[in-house]
Image (cartoon, helix red, strand yellow):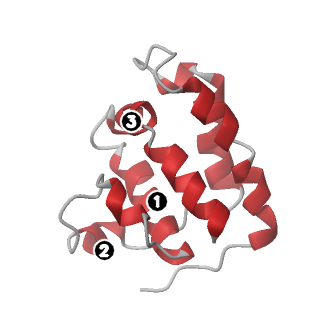
Amino acid sequence: MDILEFDRTRKEELLAYLAPLQMNLHTEDMQDIYENTIYRSFLTALDVTGFVAEFDYGSWIADLKDITDPALLDQADLEFLRKIVTAHVRFDRFLGGHLEELFASGYFVRVLERLEVL
């Protein structure tokens, strides 16, 4: 299932969040990520840069055992990375608190670290 191509010139816009997200791990009350400027801004950047893509994420994640497994990121290519991030963002609409858990665990730091090497 193909998704629209990501403009790689926008990669640096997302990578600019790596250090702030690393510094913010476990230091903020994770009750509401939308109150946290860094998290809110990062989620907006995912959308504005086109990193979050439109595709049938529900069917796509059905083939994965655990979409929160950080090991999935270790060998991810750019398309997989975009799909898994999109699935998490969309999934949060149905399971509130999902993104808070990912931010607290450092999952998005790992996403950005993987993006950095791609």
* Circle 2: element type: helix
Task: Give me the residue at 74% from left, 73% from top.
Answer: 7
Neighbor class of circle 3 (other Cα within 10 Å; few <14, some 14-19, many 20+) is some
Residue 51 in view, yes or no = no
Name which quarter of the figure residue 43 lies in: top right
94 relative position to 87: left or right = left
Q: Nearer the viewer, residue 33 or 115?
A: 115
CB within 8 Å, label 3 to label 1: no
Q: Residue 10: x percent and y percent?
A: 78, 62
30 is higher (above) or lower (below) than 21:
above
Comparing labels 3 and 1, the label whose residue is closer to the camera: 3
Task: Give me the residue at 69% from left, 41% from top.
Answer: 17
Task: Give me the residue at 30% from left, 74% from top.
Answer: 60
Count every numbered label the image shows and give the total. 3
Check disc 3 and give the amino acid type: Ser
State which tag comes first along the sequence, 1 or 2: 2
Distance in Å between CA atoms under marks 3 and 2: 23 Å
Q: Residue furthest right?
A: 9
Residue with the mark numbered 3: 105
* Circle 1: element type: helix
Residue with the mark numbered 1: 86
**Quadrant showing the C terminus:** bottom right
118 relative position to 9: left or right = left
Comparing labels 3 and 2, the label whose residue is closer to the camera: 3
State which tag comes first along the sequence, 3 or 2: 2
State which tag comes first along the sequence, 3 or 1: 1
The label number, if any, that marks residue 60 in the structure image: 2
**Quadrant showing the N terminus:** bottom left
Q: Residue 31: x percent and y percent?
A: 39, 17
Task: Give me the residue at 39% from left, 59% from top.
Answer: 87
